Image: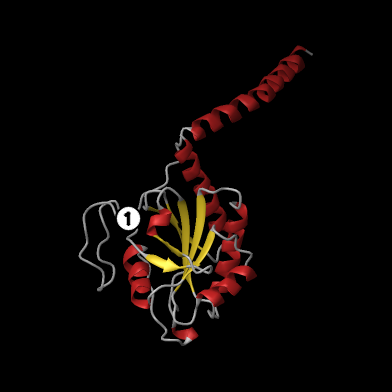
Amino acid sequence: MRGLRILQGLVLVCILMVPVLIFLFLKSFGKNEYDLPIFFEKGVEKPFEECPVADTTQHYIPEFAFTNQDEKTIGRADMQGKITIVDFFFTSCPSICPIMSKEMERVNDHFRDDPQVQLMSISIDPEYDTPELLKEYAQKHHAISGKWHFLSGPKLDTYRLARCGFVLPTLDGNGIADNFVHSDKFILVDDLGRIRGYYSGTSREEVDLLMLETKILLHGKEE
């Protein structure tokens, strides 16, 4: 009988300890002990021939200014002070783009009430993807105006930005949808313009991780 009481007492102690352990875990988590990597802290090792000679200092997203679906100029200056999630796509893409856009739609909805998070989907077929066409595409995916920007810019600048700025392989299909090559990655960029993560935009699990790590960056901004 005494052994049973001791066992019951131990069970009660364990039950009472659960909230304490949860609190300690959350407290340590709140100290930003979950550190996200900072990519290319020593520069980018010239991944593509047309990119400038590699620097040995922290890589930042370079300057650019493109036109969004509302015919407003949006670019690097608008990334400063905000967390930005970026992908490259084109509206006539027959393969991975529809999946990526549906996943980005989830991100758009998840952060709809947070002004510190914005999305940029950059067309790699800017000659076809006019602001009018991008606006139709944006409406199809329930994009929040001012939060999720669908961008097009000069072709040369677009491919240089993809390859040298976001460090992604991108090939021009010259108007033939099946000949375009681009990455399925979503890129997480912090408020200073540093790349903090790459995630497959065709994987629900990786996009869930992206949203979690975006929240971690937001938490760090609040401290």
Along the line of sight, which residue is nearer the eye, 18 or 136? 136
Please give the residue where the numbered disc 1 appears in the rendered image.
Answer: 60
Does residue 28 sit above or below 197 in this rendering? above
Query: In the image, is 157 to the left or to the right of 101?
Result: left
Q: Position of residue 14 (x, y in %)?
A: 66, 24
Amino acid at the residue labelled 1:
Tyr
Looking at the rendered image, the quarter that the N terminus falls into is: top right
Residue at x 53% of width, y 29% of height: 27
Q: How many marks?
A: 1
The residue most toward the top is: 2
Nearer the observer, 2 or 35: 35
The x, y position of residue 83, in whole percent, is 46, 51
Which one is nearer the viewer's eye here, 25 or 56?
56
Q: Is residue 96 visible?
A: no
- The color scheme shown is secondary structure
173 to 199, vertically: above or below:
below
Q: Residue at x 59, y 69 (%)?
A: 138
Tell whether 159 sits left or right of 175: left
Could you say whether the residue bearing mark 1 is in a helix, strand or loop? loop
Q: Is residue 213 above or below residue 85?
A: above
Disc 1 residue crowd, few under 14, some 14–19, many 20+, Cα 10 Å: some
Residue depicted at x 51% and y 55%: 118
Q: Is residue 29 visible?
A: yes
Q: Nearer the viewer, residue 9 or 165?
A: 165
Residue 35 point in image, percent of width and height: 42, 42
- Lateral position of residue 184 relative to residue 104, left or right: left
Image coordinates for residue 13, horizontal then vertical, percent: 67, 19
Residue pictured at 35% horizontal, 67% vertical: 161
